Image (spheres, helix red, strand yellow):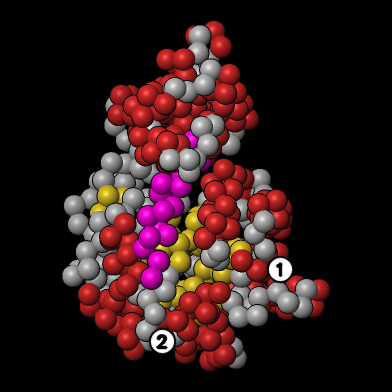
Amino acid sequence: MKHPLQKMMEDRRNGIKAGIPSYCTANPLVLEMALRRAKLLNRPVLIEATANQVNQYGGYTGMVPKDFYKMVLEMAEKIGVPEHQMILAGDHLGPLTWQNLPEKEAMDKSIELVYEYARAGFTKIHLDTSMKVADDPEGLLSTETIARRGAILYKAAMKGYEELKAEKPDVLRPVFVIGSEVPIPGGAQEAEDTLAVTSPDAFRDTVATYRRVFKEEGIEEGMNDVIAVVVQPGVEFGDDQVFLYDHDAAFDLCAALKDYPEVCFEGHSADYQSPESLRNMCQDGIAILKVGPALTYGLREALFALSFMEKELVPEAEQAHFIETLDEVMMKNPANWQKHYHGDDKQLALARKYSFSDRARYYIGQPEVTEAMDKLFENLRKYQIPMNMLHQYMPVSYNKVRDGELELDPRELAMDGVTNFMMDYEYAVTL
């Protein structure tokens, strides 16, 4: 069976401007909605886990690659999405979480990481060796070093794939993404005025260097598995700013793709783009549209709206106090936000709640927060939300409930906050 992303590339070579959203999240409600949309639209669904979310030591989710794969597969089976419709991917696989170690140790851990992802059944692998490790010389890493390390990780991934194929002959051969000219995962930390677009020469150098290195390493045919190159097309977001895609600014970069019909671009940090910006990106060759924080932001936004309605409807003593609980947990465990948010106490409090970077996503799965969320849902089933109040706090969801497209259930309303973002990406890749 042909990999859906290889099929997408065939379509693009035939002049069909195909593309796909890439949902980078480990949140169960977001994953459930991604799978439900895939079933509804009968489309492949691309779900990504990052190296810091899921790795051989558990990452911040506590899951190793096979755990994450099993979780999504079981969810898909319940929803009715066949396994071949799922594309599970590993993002930023390389020394990302081991940059404090010397090269030998960092690469040994990276080899194990990539191997475990491929062995578990992940079939889209981002080989990201762009980050420096402890004993690298000063200055930027050379493209040569990046490609050499990438080739080592490609071999590790293919070893995992071949072992899995021996047990599961119909498993899809993995495809690969190279390049990493992007900001840190999760959005910019500081306000910016301008954003540099990857130069066409840098893109060409990445491809040429990988081709040469793969040939020298005896894996020349491996370049046939490379379907995308990560570039910075001029999109990004921070606490309260979004850089919308500028077709003219990215024109020269995207024009360079005509000489490389075997690949497309993968655009990271495509969160919060307008539907038309996303569609223009897809049309211009940025066919893989990565989105992560915006999805959990949509969920958080909906949960806050439900909380505001709960304060109106439910006696104080019975309230879940979801908003307060989330902030208390974030304050008690600040490691996942304090390096990312800046300002005085008031500014930090607002960022914890409302930042587009959505560091709150690291906490929504914490037991105390999950318990408050479940209680919020229970309360709003007991004290049902009136339609006029729903219109006040969730007008987009109100229209769907009014028209019989959405159930008036608090959990469904929370998940609709995710749907509203996903629909922008679905529009972008709909031909």
The magenta segment:
413-431
Please state the horizontal and vertical placement of residue 307, each as a whole percent of the image: 46, 23
Decide: is 132 above or below 346: below
Depth order, front residue of 169/329? 169
Q: Report how far apart the C-alphas of labels 1 and 2 lie in the structure.
A: 33 Å
Q: Position of residue 19 (x, y in %)?
A: 42, 70
| Element carrying mark 1 | helix
- CB contact under 8 Å: marks 1 and 2: no
Kind of residue at badge 1: Arg
Residue type, mark 2 in image: Asn
Q: Does the rendering let one see residue 8? A: yes
- 34 vs 396, left or right, is right
Q: Nearer the viewer, residue 44 or 325?
A: 44
| Residue at horizontal 51 percent and vertical 32 percent from the top | 408
Q: Residue at x 38, y 38 (%)?
A: 399
Front position among marks 1 and 2: 2
Q: In the rendered view of the protein, which quadrant contains the C terminus? A: bottom left
Asked whether, in this view, residue 308 is left or right of residue 167, the answer is left
Displayed quadrant of residue 359? top left
Q: Residue furthest right?
A: 167
Looking at the picture, tell me which residue is in the foreground, 277 or 360: 277
Categorize mark 2 by other alpha carbons within 10 Å: few (<14), some (14-19), many (20+): few
| Placement of 49 over or under 351, stated as above or below | below
**To which residue does mark 1 refer?**
119
Residue 164 percent coordinates (x, y): 75, 73
Q: Main secondary structure of the magenta part?
A: helix
